[in-house]
Image (tube, rainbow, N blue to C red):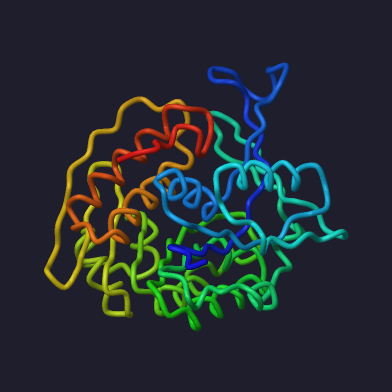
């Protein structure tokens, strides 16, 4: 099978209180799955693209639930390994304080380039990896570089800078090599400033230009008020309005899925931006990283 996209990265079991409640007072938690790459895969699969997700999970109930959920979305999970000695990672959403990760020593934190040996990613139309993969361990970092270095299709990266991970203290140093090896960069405005920003010009366009000078042909910059993209044809920007969100986590991944879907189908940049904004907004209407993702654009 020729895949439209192959993604590589960790997915965790995700726990969250019901809307309007907080962890320390709720009587129960909602159980879901969460991972930047697999979130994007869910979106792409719902839009009719052929996608595969490569990762490693523990031999535990959390891993079983994740596999069943993602396979049920139409994502090919045949290259997801299982580790009998390490657990599946966990994420706890706490309204008002953010997200807490319990992923140190997880199964995915030890997956290296060998995880890609049988995967036909070189034949895929696109591959996707995020900076999270570079930050959860030295082995995943090496695997991310292998994926981007050997892929022949469109190489897509979202920096997705995070704190509290193995490599967070030197996250710019670890994530920049991914940027250098990609064709399409999808980044938040603040993280792009951290990675390649210019103190004299902190505009989204200037950051995109500096990022483009490192290798990507197409650079998308997401911010609270707008999204913009720099291509060989120049800079385009679209203003956006943010409505109240039930859960904003996962909106960036959903935007990425909408944008990538249009571009892989040959659609123009302005259409891709609008699709990304619609998908990102849809996901925020539910207490889940993916439940609100639409099934058409």
Q: Residue furthest right?
A: 85
Which residue lies at the image location 20% right of the left edge and 50% below the top edge? 271
Question: Number of callouts in the render?
Answer: 0
Which residue lies at the image location 41% right of the left edge and 48% below the top edge? 48
In the image, 170 versus 247, the foreground residue is 247
Which residue lies at the image location 36% right of the left edge and 40% below the top edge? 280
In the rendered image, residue 151, in percent from the top left (x then y), is placed at: 47, 79
Name which quarter of the figure residue 241 lies in: top left
Q: Is residue 242 left or right of residue 51?
A: left
In the rendered image, residue 275, in percent from the top left (x then y), is placed at: 27, 45
Vertical position of residue 107 compared to residue 120: above or below: above
Vertical position of residue 180 compared to residue 4: above or below: below
In the rendered image, residue 143, in percent from the top left (x then y), is placed at: 61, 75
Q: Residue furthest bottom?
A: 150
In the image, 4 versus 179, the foreground residue is 4
In the rendered image, residue 258, in percent from the top left (x then y), is placed at: 34, 48
Q: Is residue 104 left or right of residue 243?
A: right
Which residue lies at the image location 29% right of the left edge and 54% below the top edge? 262
Q: Residue furthest front?
A: 1
Name which quarter of the figure residue 189 lies in: bottom left
Image quarter of the C terminus: top left
């Amino acid at each position: 099978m020729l895949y439209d996209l192959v993604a590589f990265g960790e997915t965790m079991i995700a726990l969250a209180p019901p809307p309007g409640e907080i962890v320390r007072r709720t009587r129960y938690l909602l159980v879901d799955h969460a991972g930047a790459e697999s979130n994007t895969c869910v979106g792409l699969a719902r839009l009719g693209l052929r996608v595969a997700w490569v990762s490693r999970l523990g031999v535990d109930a959390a891993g079983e639930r994740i596999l069943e959920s993602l396979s049920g979305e139409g994502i090919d999970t045949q290259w997801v390994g299982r580790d009998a000695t390490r657990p599946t990672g966990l994420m706890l959403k706490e309204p008002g304080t953010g997200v807490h990760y319990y992923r140190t020593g997880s199964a995915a934190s030890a997956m290296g380039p060998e995880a890609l040996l049988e995967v036909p990613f070189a034949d895929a139309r696109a591959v996707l990896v995020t900076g999270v993969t570079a930050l959860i361990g030295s082995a995943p970092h090496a695997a991310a570089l292998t994926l981007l270095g050997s892929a022949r299709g469109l190489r897509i990266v979202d920096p997705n800078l995070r704190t509290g991970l193995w490599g967070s203290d030197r996250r710019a140093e670890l994530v920049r090599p991914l940027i250098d090896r990609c064709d399409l960069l999808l980044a938040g405005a603040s993280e792009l400033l951290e990675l390649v920003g210019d103190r004299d010009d902190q505009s989204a366009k200037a950051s995109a230009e500096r990022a483009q000078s490192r290798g990507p042909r197409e650079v998308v910059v997401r911010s609270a008020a707008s999204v913009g993209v720099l291509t060989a044809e120049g800079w385009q920007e679209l203003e956006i309005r943010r409505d109240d969100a039930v859960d904003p986590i996962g909106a960036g991944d959903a935007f990425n899925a909408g944008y990538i879907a249009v571009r892989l189908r040959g659609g123009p940049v302005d259409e891709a931006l609008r699709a990304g904004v619609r998908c990102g907004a849809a996901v925020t209407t539910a207490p889940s990283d993916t439940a609100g993702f639409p099934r058409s654009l």
